[in-house]
Amino acid sequence: MVQHKITEDKPNPLSDPIAERDLLSALIYQPELIGSVSITPGDFGDPDYRPILRALQRLHAEGIPPEVTHLASELQSFDAAPGVSAYDAVGGTSTLGPLCRAAIENGPIHAIHFKFNADKVREAGQRRRIVEYGQRVADIASNGLPTADVLEFIREQSQAITTTATGTAAPAFTNVMSCAELLALDLHVDFLVDGILVRGQPGVIGGRSKTLKSSMLVDLVLSLGTGQPFLGQFATKRATTAYWSGESGAATIRAKARAVAAARGFALGDADVFWSFDLPKLARADHLSAIADVITKRNIDVAIIDPLYLSLLDASTAGQASNVFAMGNALQPLSELTAATGCTILLCHHFRKSAGDPDEPAALEELSQAGVGEWARQWMLLARRSPYQADGRHDLWLRAGGSAGHAGLYALDVDEGDPAGFESEGRRWDVTVRSVADARDETRRAAEDRKAEQQAQRDEDDRRKMLEALRRTPDGDTVKALRQLAGLSNERAANALRSLVGEGRAEGCEIKKYRRTETGYRHTEI
């Protein structure tokens, strides 16, 4: 028989103490995970952990939170060996204490990697069963039992091991609830920004080109970090916020932050906001784990990552941006991060170049890359109400909504001051939130004014062309001939002549052509 020696520089395939510890701390932090994967006490290599899992399962079945006192009481209620309570067998608080502290300090991170650790623990437990099975086969074969009995034992045990290895917990959709249980659920919606942003739901902030996405994000993070109204209008709860920015650069973001702080009248240093200008790669498990660690240690309530296209995919997965299934798989860990930490994760994203009607508010369908709109539970979408004139003034639409049922459309008038200003006093952040009806009425009036101005300019051009035609025919000519000379249509030529006659710059006359007399017009010197 070949002996496989386990060396110190290789992990032990029969036991993973770190995965076992992290798995238990995740279950203590988030006990609802107990029903999401098939784990048995026998899967643990550490004998102290086996009764702890059993106690956690019993507490979860009774709806009792796995606090250290409850765990201790449950372990004292059954024996690990004759005359020895499970509590004493595991070492009491010397074992429970570190586990519960790990749940408090690192539980969110361990919960994110729960399935990974559960697979490692279950795999190690399965390997131990295979080793034990091999030893039992060797023992009974050496005891002189008939070969047929040995083979039957092998068949039965192999089937049992295979069944254990492939056993899985019931799917989540089998956890049905009664109407009474549905009514008893706490489904209260907690708005961080009134009517705009809900706590604990992943979302997206998107916009068409040049719609002040970064400036809006700076306003949002500082409003959250101070409790000041978002855009000076929407009531906001104070929340610790982190902003990862990968496009604008530190100097530009700081200039925008100073402008927002000056407009709202607070000291920038007093805002409960963390900033970073290095983007994580969200497709990497180690980066997600690091973000979870930052969120936990800094007690971050809202995390904003800007932009999505630089942080979600890498060189090997960039070609999957149009695949809704691949994108859903890439975005799902962010939903799990939100669920595990309670932190509201928001992604800033761009729209497709071929966006919708430029004169209308933006819609989720305009977001680039597949699956983003489907993943987001809430959104803020920006679009221009009128073309930018490079004067620091912006007329915008803001559409906000989400699966919590909130929805709103707002018109924003933004004045950033001198476009050439940077951190000078010419840079500012003045925002007015207006009703949609007022904005649309103003847009209609502006369109009518532009149309009237264009018509007046066209009429003036027509008069100039007709006057030039009249000057080229000092004896006058017919309307048809003058129209052709001026290059105008019948209606526009008639209007131009009527206007010139009214101004006294032209008059009617008789024109003799081909022995006939026709009505015409000639120029009148004033």
Image (cartoon, grey):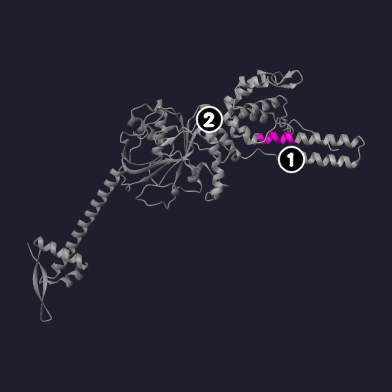
Residue 308: give x, y in percent of width and height.
49, 42
SS for callout 1: helix
Q: Pointer 2: what residue? A: 294
Between 367 and 122, the one nearer to me in the picture: 122
Q: Position of residue 104 (x, y in %)?
A: 57, 24
The answer for how far apart the CA atoms under marks 2 and 1 are is 41 Å
Quadrant in the rendering for residue 260: top left
What amino acid does circle 2 point to?
Answer: Val
Q: Is residue 4 visible?
A: no
Q: Is residue 480 visible?
A: yes
Give the residue at mark 1.
163
Q: Is residue 380 left or right of residue 433?
A: right
Left or right, residue 61 beside residue 83: left
Vertical order, 44 against 393 (above or below): above
| Residue beneath the point at 74% across and 33% down | 14
Looking at the magenta stretch, what is its main secondary structure? helix
Which residue ends up furthest to the bottom in the rendered image?
A: 515
**Element type at mark 2:** helix
Query: x and y percent of residue 159 in the render?
Result: 78, 41
In reply to whether residue 120 is colored magenta, the answer given is yes
Q: Quadrant of the C terminus?
A: bottom left
**First in sequence: mark 2 or mark 1?**
1
Quarter containing the N terminus: top right
Under mark 1, the amino acid is Thr
Q: Nearer the viewer, residue 257 or 397?
A: 397
Does 186 sit left or right of 55 as displayed?
left
From the top left corner, tell me how far across and down residue 354 is, in percent.
42, 53
Q: Nearer the viewer, residue 256 or 97?
A: 97
Residue at horizontal 8%, vertical 71%? Answer: 509
Badge 1: residue crowd in 10 Å (few <14, some 14–19, many ≥20): few
- The span picked out in magenta is 118-126
Task: Specify few, some or many for label 2: CA neighbours under 10 Å numbering under 14, 14-19, or 20 or more.
Answer: some
